[in-house]
Image (cartoon, helix red, strand yellow):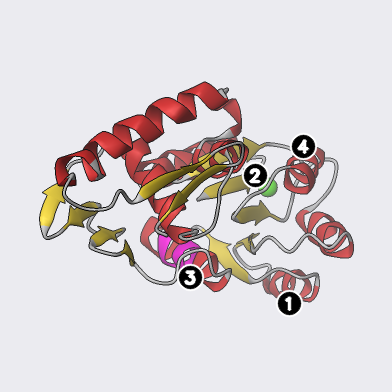
Amino acid sequence: MRILIVEDEHRIANSIKKGLEQERYAVDVAYTGTDGYDLASTEDYDLILLDIMLPEMNGIEICKELRKNKIHIPILMLTAKGQTEDKVVGLDAGADDYMTKPFSFDELLARVRALTRRKGTIVNTNLSVEDLVLDKKLFSVKRDGQEIKLSSKEFSLLEYLLANKKTIVTKDQIITHVWDYDADILPNTIEVYIKNLRNKIDKPFNNKKPLINTVRGFGYKIGS
Ligand code: CA
């Protein structure tokens, strides 16, 4: 899951980024309205956290402009305390939800989960294929009842594959959804991660059909 934060107050933006990264989201930050609009309209995000009062271009304008250009990434507006009229204007402009600052991080997380779920990428906290189950909330993966230990990035990669199970995902799609903009990941790196993942979820179960399939020239697919 990849999230864009558009917020000019560096302290707030950076603390949200840090918190979301701990929850294994890939996060980019834009500190001005135009930077935010440029990223939102060119990169493939799963969610945008959008402040309203921003330099250069405000959150309402960004929202309207994105929707006008048929970009339907879920948007969670961040409004300052007391500006109730902003909520209505924000929702009218095409935002999906709003939160009033200051907010609790737990509430933010709950809304982030709800909005990314609404998009259909994650149906619930459990994702599975055949006898493999990933529990997003417990950060656990089991195959055939056996616990499998994954690194944080391996977990995010598996989560992305499972959210798109039985469909082919390209290396570029993986890079876009699992890593943030600054990560500078090369397609070869994805091969390494896939190999590590196979060593953990397929290799120890060599009496079973492998779950991760390479679709030569296209990408990868989990499940057949
Ligand atoms: Ca602001």
Assess whether mark 3 and mark 2 are in contact (beta carbons under 8 angstroms).
no
User: Dots 2 and 1: beta carbons under 8 Å?
Assistant: no
Circle 2 residue: 7
Q: Which of marks 1 and 3 is nearer the N terminus?
A: 1
Q: Is mark 2 within 8 Å of ligand 1?
A: yes
Separation of residues labelled 4 and 2 (CA atoms): 10 Å
Q: As shown in the figure, which amino acid type bears the numbered disc 3? A: Ala
The residue type indicated by label 4 comes to: Asp
Q: What stretch is highlighted in magenta?
A: 109-113
- Kindly identify the residue that appears in the image at 37 percent across and 37 percent down: 153
* Front in this rendered view, residue 193 or 100: 193
Residue at the image position 54 percent from the left and 41 percent from the top: 174
Which of the two labelled residues, at mark 2 and mark 3, occupies the earlier sequence position?
A: 2
Mark 3 vs 4, N-terminal side: 4
Q: Which residue is drawn at 54% across and 47% down?
A: 2
Mark 4 / mark 1, whichever is N-terminal: 4
Dot 1 amino acid type = Val
Q: Residue 141: where, in percent of width, then height?
A: 22, 53
Q: Mark 3 points at which residue?
A: 114
Label 2 to label 3: alpha-carbon separation: 21 Å
The dot on residue 127 is none
Within 8 Å of ligand 1, the CB of disc 4? no
What secondary structure is marked by label 3? helix
Cα–Cα gap, marks 4 and 1: 24 Å
Q: Disc 3, ligand 1: is the CB inside 8 Å?
A: no
Q: Distance between the residues labelled 2 and 1?
A: 20 Å
Whether residue 24 can be seen here:
no
Res. 50 visible in picture: yes
